[in-house]
Image: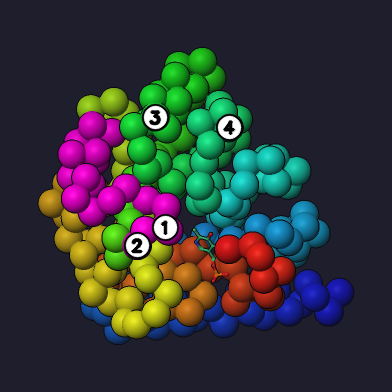
Amino acid sequence: MQEDSGIARRLEAIRARIAAASVAAGRAADAVRLVAVSKTHDRVSVQAAFAAGQRLFGENRVQEAAQKFPFEGAKLHIIGALQTNKALEAVKLADCIESLDRPRLLDAIGAAGQKAGRMPEILVQVNIGDEPQKAGVALGEADAFIKLARTRLGPALTGLMCIPPAEGDPMPYFKRLAAMADAHGLAVRSMGMSGDYEAAIACGATHVRIGTAIFGSRPANVT
Ligand SMILES: *Cc1c(COP(=O)(O)O)cnc(C)c1O
C-alpha cells in the first residue's frame, strides 16, 4: 500500500514538473508525454501507476515486457536494444519501438510487420554522443539510415530517440536530436530520463522516459 501511494505521489509530482517545464519553454502544458519506464518492476507496480492515471509504459526487454503486457488500457513502448530474433514478438506486443538502430533490425521489423499484420510506431535511436559503447545509429550514418527507414516503414516512422552521454551537459545533445528530427520532418523526439527530463523538454522533447523517479531504484546492473 505504501509503495502504491509512493508511486502515485511521485507520478503526480513529475507530471507537475513536466507541465511546468513545458510552459517555461513556451509550449503547451500537455505538450509532452510521459513514458513510465517499468523495467525490473513487477506488474503490481504497473498496476499502481495505472491506478494513478498512467497509461503509457516503457520496457527495455521484450521477454520481460511480455510478462506485464498487454495490460488492458495501457500502451507499451519498447525502449531497449532489440535483437532481430525478438522483432516479431516486439511488433506484436508494442505500440511503439523506440530503438531501431541498424539495417538488419529494420529488415527484421519490416518482415515482422508483414507477418503480424500490424506495425507499431517506430523511432530511430541515434547515438547522439557518438559513444563507442552505446546503442543507436552512429551520427555519421544517421541521415542515410533515417531515409532508409522512412522508405521501408513509411508513416510508421514517427521520430527519433536518444540517450545523451552520462557526463556533462545533455542540452547540446538534445538540441542536436531535435534538429535532426526537424530536418527529416519527424514529429516525435523521445529524450530525457529521470535526471534530465526538464532539460530535454526545454530542447523540444515530445516524450520523456522516466523510470527511477517514479518506481524507485533498480539493481545496479540494469541500465
Ligand atoms: C531505463 C531507461 C530509461 C529510464 O531511466 P531512469 O533514469 O530510470 O529514468 C529511459 N530510457 C531508456 C532507453 C532506458 O533504458
Which residue, given by chain and number where applicable, does mark 1 sit on? 134
Distance between mark 3 and mark 2 Cα atoms = 21 Å
**Upstream in the sequence, badge 1 or badge 3?**
3
Disc 2 and disc 1 in contact, CB within 8 angstroms:
yes
Which residue, given by chain and number where applicable, does mark 4 sit on? 86
**Image quarter in which the N terminus is found:** bottom right
Distance between mark 2 and mark 1 Cα atoms = 5 Å
Magenta residues span: 131-149
Which residue is at a point 28% across and 33% down the rendered structure image? 149
Distance between mark 4 and mark 1 Cα atoms = 20 Å
How packed is label 1: few (under 14 Cα within 10 Å), some, or many (20 or more)? Answer: some
| Amino acid type assigned to the residue bearing label 4 in the image | Lys
**Upstream in the sequence, badge 4 or badge 1?**
4
Which residue, given by chain and number where applicable, does mark 3 sit on? 104
- Indicate the quadrant where residue 89 lies: top right
Which residue is at a point 23% across and 74% down the rendered structure image? 172
**Image quarter in which the C terminus is found:** bottom right
Q: Does the magenta stretch include residue 143?
A: yes
Q: Could you tell me residue 52's position as x and y percent?
A: 68, 67
Which residue, given by chain and number where applicable, does mark 2 sit on? 131
Distance between mark 1 and mark 3 Cα atoms = 17 Å
